[in-house]
Image: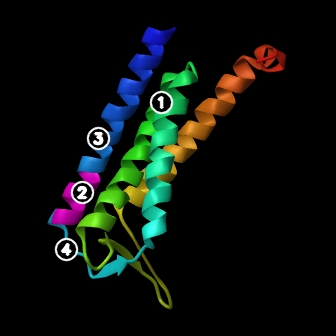
Amino acid sequence: MLCRVKTRRALLIATAVVFASVDLAHKTLDPAEFHHARAPFVAFVMAGLVAALVMLVPRIPSNAAALGAGVACGGTLGNLVSLLAWAQGVPDPLVFVGATHSLAFNLADVFALSGDALLLSAAIVHGVRHRARLQERV
């Protein structure tokens, strides 16, 4: 069991590094007109969230949950590094302009949202498949 937890943790960390790198490369190579600022407190929350996901999610015996957490952590790490690296704030190079409103975001936002969706879906599927064990005492 411990070996599998380490394997899932390695999968999570490797996925996070790859997705954060893709996001940071995109932000570096694609100039952004728009930036959004974040409070320093948010950096601590983001770092705490990544640490919690890395420590807790691999305990779920699901590679899909580890992969989803890795994608989400990659997006979070991408925004965290951007917050620290860019003086104007986190760059938002993806812009969709509408008739009255516009939407600006970055790949890290997409990664965080899709990773969260995959993580929650995998946790729900795991819970449904093992619902008898949910009644066991811890």
Percent x, y for residue 20?
A: 30, 49
Q: Is residue 65 visible?
A: no
User: What crowding class fits label 3: few (fewer than 14 Cα within 10 Å), some (14-19), or many (20 or more)?
Assistant: some
Q: Secondary structure at mark 1?
A: helix
Of the two numbered discs 3 and 4 on the same chain, state the one appearing first in sequence: 3
Of the two numbered discs 2 and 1 on the same chain, state the one appearing first in sequence: 2
Residue at 46% x, 41% y is 51
> Toward which corner of the image does residue 17 lie, by quadrant?
top left
User: What crowding class fits label 2: few (fewer than 14 Cα within 10 Å), some (14-19), or many (20 or more)?
Assistant: many
* Amino acid tagged 1: Ala
| Numbered disc in front, either 3 or 4 | 3
Label 1 and label 4: CA atoms lie apart by 32 Å
Q: Which residue is mark 3?
A: 17
Q: Which mark is residue 66?
A: 1
Residue at 50% x, 38% y is 53
Above or below, 1 relative to 94: above
Of the two numbered discs 2 and 3 on the same chain, state the one appearing first in sequence: 3
Find the magenta span and give its range: 22-28
Percent x, y for residue 89?
A: 33, 75
User: What crowding class fits label 4: few (fewer than 14 Cα within 10 Å), some (14-19), or many (20 or more)?
Assistant: few
Q: Which residue is mark 4?
A: 31
Does the segment drawn in magenta span residue 24?
yes
Q: Secondary structure at mark 3?
A: helix
Q: Which mark is residue 96?
A: none
* Amino acid tagged 2: Leu
Above or below, 5 relative to 47: above
